[in-house]
Image: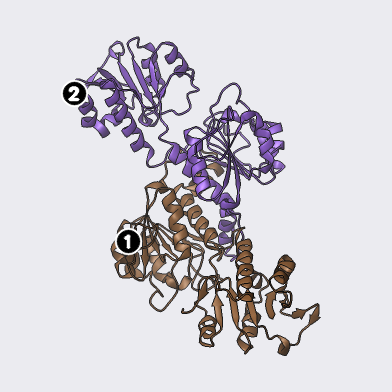
Chain colours: A brown, B purple
Amino acid sequence: MDLLIAHSAVERLGARLLACDPAIRLLQLDQYGQVRMNGRECAESEVRPDVAWLSLDIFAQAQLGRFIGFVERCASIQWLHTVHAGLDLPFYSSLLERKVRLSNSHVHAPAIAEYVLGHVLALFQLHDRFRQSQLERRWQPLGFRELGRSRWLIVGIGNVGTQIANRAMSLGAQVVGVRRRDLPHPGIGQVVAIGELRRHLPDADVVVLCCPLARETQNLVNADFLAAMKTGSILVNVARGALVDEVALLEGLDRGRPGCAVLDVTAFEPLPSDSPLWTHHNVRLTAHSAFAGSGTEGRGDELFLENLHRYCTGKPLLEEITTI
Amino acid sequence: MDLLIAHSAVERLGARLLACDPAIRLLQLDQYGQVRMNGRECAESEVRPDVAWLSLDIFAQAQLGRFIGFVERCASIQWLHTVHAGLDLPFYSSLLERKVRLSNSHVHAPAIAEYVLGHVLALFQLHDRFRQSQLERRWQPLGFRELGRSRWLIVGIGNVGTQIANRAMSLGAQVVGVRRRDLPHPGIGQVVAIGELRRHLPDADVVVLCCPLARETQNLVNADFLAAMKTGSILVNVARGALVDEVALLEGLDRGRPGCAVLDVTAFEPLPSDSPLWTHHNVRLTAHSAFAGSGTEGRGDELFLENLHRYCTGKPLLEEITTI
């Protein structure tokens, strides 16, 4: 079995990969876009993996385009495991059409959930104003909003949304989850369908976007959505930039609805240097880093190894995707 | 029964106070230090309360000295309820010696616990570096430490320490509690006696001070303590400034042990304008505000009303203190 894998992932896991299947052959993609097997450079035509692992390393090596190219051109590929939670790249739906098996992961969910909590607490607790007072050597006590007394609207309660909800609820927040249909959800008391979303916006102190990007959700956060938000509320986007109409958002921020926007993602990434989002006083930008917690790589490695073992022994894969 | 109370607390609670005892007479201390009863200014000699409530209002009105003076001079006082959790003011021990009943409160514990969480997450998640990148219009992804993979040492596991521990553990952190003796504690797996503290410092990513200030704990955080800390760790002080030797702390920060200090309290408050703490890059100052969450006042009101009801009906008081 030939496995297309990042070179750095092999350095990290080497023997543990071979323990799944001693006959495995590692097609190692390095940071220069070159593929090697047993130290020998492979010609493009030789890169014909049976399985492929799109790990975080591929992004770190800036080789996503090369990796996808190999998978797309390879007729023999049977299974792709990807670190992507959001599968909006057309690449993924075309794989399913080709009957390639696909599994993804939610190993960034704990990191993203901590990110959301950290930013909301920092805004509630006026960290910026305390920093400013300190710079001015002013001893200026300030009261702050407690998260335990806030109401959250979490748009999308898949793995990421559920982990955000659990943490907010453990601190005492009231949470309403929003999903495509108002099916109940274990652990989140109130769940409403996306059609009901607007009705809940005026009550929400925090609105978190963690839903898939699809035709129905593109520009979900438009002028109407923003006008329905609570004054001084916080909008957090950890999903995809295109969920938000950025021109409308800037207008909303100027009216205090929301009071602040925490944007890990933007419609175009990297954000163009002339975007007014950079300089708006009530925007926080974090360059698509919410997934990048210190535990994400390790959780991703363990999940892939478990799935590789399952694949080699004919057991059902974890997190297998059959429709997008 | 005569109750010494802040004027603003009467405005907030009026009828609810009288519901406990219709014969109650309210000695209302206003923001100018004047006491009124039924709208009439009282002479100093008339302020002879049976019970007194030191609420947050007294601080907001900057009348703590006046309030304490009335209580100290009043021979007839039977009971004082205070918002203070830390009872290191000599005033409190002298009350107990005079056989005055004393009850305090831990209504700020949820606010302080959120404060600690917010600051640790913000430091782990490099909020300052993201802000700097944004100012420079640089799209700079950064990885961050997850709280769920961190180890905490919580010095003092009374009400505040326990609430901090619960929240950190709910996010997955490993917590060691430190108390005077190594008695077990419901909910915190590992508890060690203060004599064992040093041995646990090298492993702790976060050290939180939330213990009482006493002779044994003054300058607890000295050069030896700091030298034993983990490089890059975070020290948070939400208790009393005098727990920390500030000269030694500044030297420790320059060596990266700790990597950062979050100080809600300092040895002298307000912090003198020539203190080097103001300008140290790795110090965060918040002017004794960690208690000031949006829920603290309401929790304090409910606790006092419950205790007033208990006092009037001869039931045991909540949070009664018999030794300091």
Residue A204, image quadrant: bottom left
Residue A314 in percent (x, y) is at: 60, 76
| Contact? badges 1 and 2 (CB < 8 Å) | no
Task: Name the side, left or right, on which B16 lies relative to A37.
Answer: left
**Does residue A106 appear anywhere in the picture?**
yes
Residues A253 and B193: in front is B193
Residue B118 or residue B35, whichever sits in front: B118
Q: Position of residue B250 (x, y in %)?
A: 67, 37
> Percent x, y for residue A32?
73, 77
Figure label count: 2
Q: Chain of mark 2?
A: B
Q: How much space separates mark 1 and mark 2, taking CA atoms? A: 44 Å
- Do dots 1 and 2 share one subunit? no
Residue occupying the point 45% across, 37% down: B109
The amino acid on which the numbered mark 2 sits, given as a three-letter code, is Pro
- Mark 1 or 2: in front is 2
> What numbered label is drawn on residue B22?
2
Relative height, residue B91 to residue A226 (above, below): above
Drawn side of residue A201 relative to residue A166, left or right: left
Residue flagged by tag 1: what amino acid is it?
A: Leu
Secondary structure beneath disc 1? helix
> Is A240 located above or below residue A169 in the figure?
below
Q: Quick one: label 1, few (<14), some, or many (20+) residues within 10 Å?
A: many
Tell me which corner region of the image, top left, top right, bottom left or bottom right, holds residue B91: top left
Q: Can you identify the residue that label 1 sits on? A: A201
Residue B143, picture quadrant: bottom right
Q: Chain of mark 1?
A: A
